[in-house]
Amino acid sequence: RFAPVEDLLLAILRPALPAATVGTLIPATMPYPFVLARRAGGASLDERFLDNPLVDVQVWAQSDSAAGNLSADARFALVTAWRSQTVVPGVGSIARFRDSAGPTLLPDDTVPNGVYRYQATYELAIRAL
C-alpha cells in the first residue's frame, strides 16, 4: 500500500523551502509565504509498485517576485528529488516528473491586496518502498 503522496511532498518541500510554511490544507489564518502541496487527481498504475498522482502546488507570498521565486523553488526541489532519486524512508521516491501546468500567477479576489498566488500542477510517478 502506498503512503499518501502528500507525505512525500512534505518531506521534500519542507527542508527545501525553510522560509515558508508548507502544508496540505489552507490554514484559517494563512502565514506568508505559504505553500500548499496536495494530490489533485491521478490513479495508481499498479498498487504494488507505482502510483501516478497529479499534484497541485500553490504558493502565496506578499510580492509577485517572492511568490514566483518560491513557486520555482518548489518545482526545483521536486525535480531535484526526482533526478537524484531521493528516497523518503517509509514513503517512496519520485520515479518520473512532468509539468502538466507550470507555475502561473493566478489573480485571486479572495486574498488581501498585496498577496500574490502562483499555481503549478505536476504529474508524478511514485515508486513505493
Image (cartoon, grey):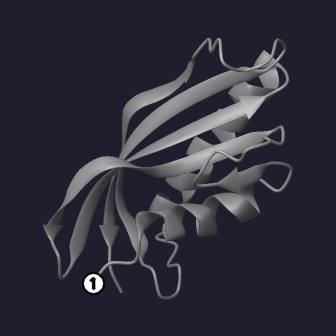
Q: Is residue 105 above or below residue 61?
A: above
Q: Is residue 15 left or right of residue 79?
A: right
Q: Is residue 86 left or right of residue 127?
A: right
Between 98 and 90, the one lying in front of the other is 90
**What crowding class fits label 1: few (fewer than 14 Cα within 10 Å), some (14-19), or many (20 or more)?**
few
Q: Is residue 90 left or right of residue 75?
A: left
Q: Quadrant of the C terminus?
A: bottom left
Q: Quadrant of residue 95?
A: bottom left
Q: Is residue 125 above or below residue 58?
A: below
User: Which amino acid type corresponds to the residue marked 1 in the rendered image?
Assistant: Arg
Q: Residue furthest front?
A: 28
Q: Quadrant of residue 92?
A: bottom left
The location of residue 6, given as percent across then percent down, is: 49, 63
Q: Quadrant of residue 44?
A: bottom left
The residue under the point 57% across, 43% down is 75
Secondary structure at numbered mark 1: loop
The location of residue 50, given as percent across then percent down, is: 22, 71
* Residue 84 visible, this angle: no
* Residue 85 visible, this angle: yes
Q: Quadrant of the N terminus?
A: bottom left
Between 6 and 102, the one lying in front of the other is 6
Q: Which residue is mark 1?
A: 1
The residue under the point 49% across, 33% down is 120
Q: Residue furthest left?
A: 46
The number of callouts visible is 1
The location of residue 21, given as percent across then percent down, is: 77, 52
